[in-house]
Amino acid sequence: MISACLRILALTPLVTVMLFCQDAWALQTHGGIEGVVVHQVAHIQYLGALGYLLWDIRRSGFAGVGWLYLQRFCWLMMIWNGLAFIGHLAQMNLPEEAVSTEDGYLSALLLPPVSFDRWVYYVTALDHLVITPALFVLFLAMRSFSRAAVSEKMEEGR
């Protein structure tokens, strides 16, 4: 009886969200300069944290494929952070009329004439070409760690 009540209690938030949810837009624009500054500082902090993680992995001399994948993830994410940082700076330097958002923000078009600033903005907007492989490499690292832990546990059980 108690376990049934606990199950119902545990499912209540899920059912509530499913019944009463509305549109949730996963896009946040930064109003004013303070939002951009905080966002840029976060990129710098994340870049530093990844650099420290990479340094610590190399210093510790961990062996195994998973640790190599994790190092590659750190490098790719550090590159992504640099691209995103530069891209945000380039976006701030663009005039408002440089980007057309007639069909909404997600279908933004960069308008001519092509200049260095616009070219930098365009190239850095392709940051998904770096972050997607980075997340895949992180998946490979976690899978490698998981498989190593399972095989180690099986060897202990023998």
Image (tube, rainbow, N blue to C red):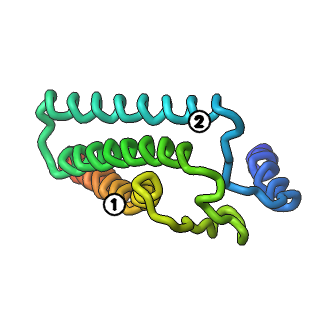
**Residue at image point 79% right, 49% down:** 13
Disc 2 to disc 1, how far (Cα)? 26 Å
Answer yes or no: is residue 154 visible: no
Answer yes or no: is residue 115 visible: yes
Give the x, y percent position of residue 14: 76, 54
Toward the viewer: 114 or 126? Answer: 114
**In the shown orientation, is residue 61 left or right of residue 74?**
left
Under circle 2, the secondary element is helix
Give the x, y percent position of residue 59: 14, 28
Q: Is residue 49 above or below residue 74?
A: above
The residue carrying mark 1 is 133
Under circle 1, the secondary element is helix
**Residue at image point 42% right, 43% down:** 86
**Residue at image point 33% right, 35% down:** 50
Q: Residue furthest right?
A: 20
**In the shown orientation, is residue 69 left or right of residue 81?**
left
Quadrant hosting residue 114: bottom left
**In the shown orientation, is residue 4 left or right of residue 127?**
right
**In the shown orientation, is residue 61 left or right of residue 76?**
left
**Residue at image point 65% right, 53% down:** 96
Task: Count the labels in the image.
Answer: 2
Q: Nearer the viewer, mark 2 or mark 1?
A: 2
Q: Which mark is residue 36?
A: 2
Give the x, y percent position of residue 115: 43, 58
Q: Amino acid at mark 1?
A: Pro
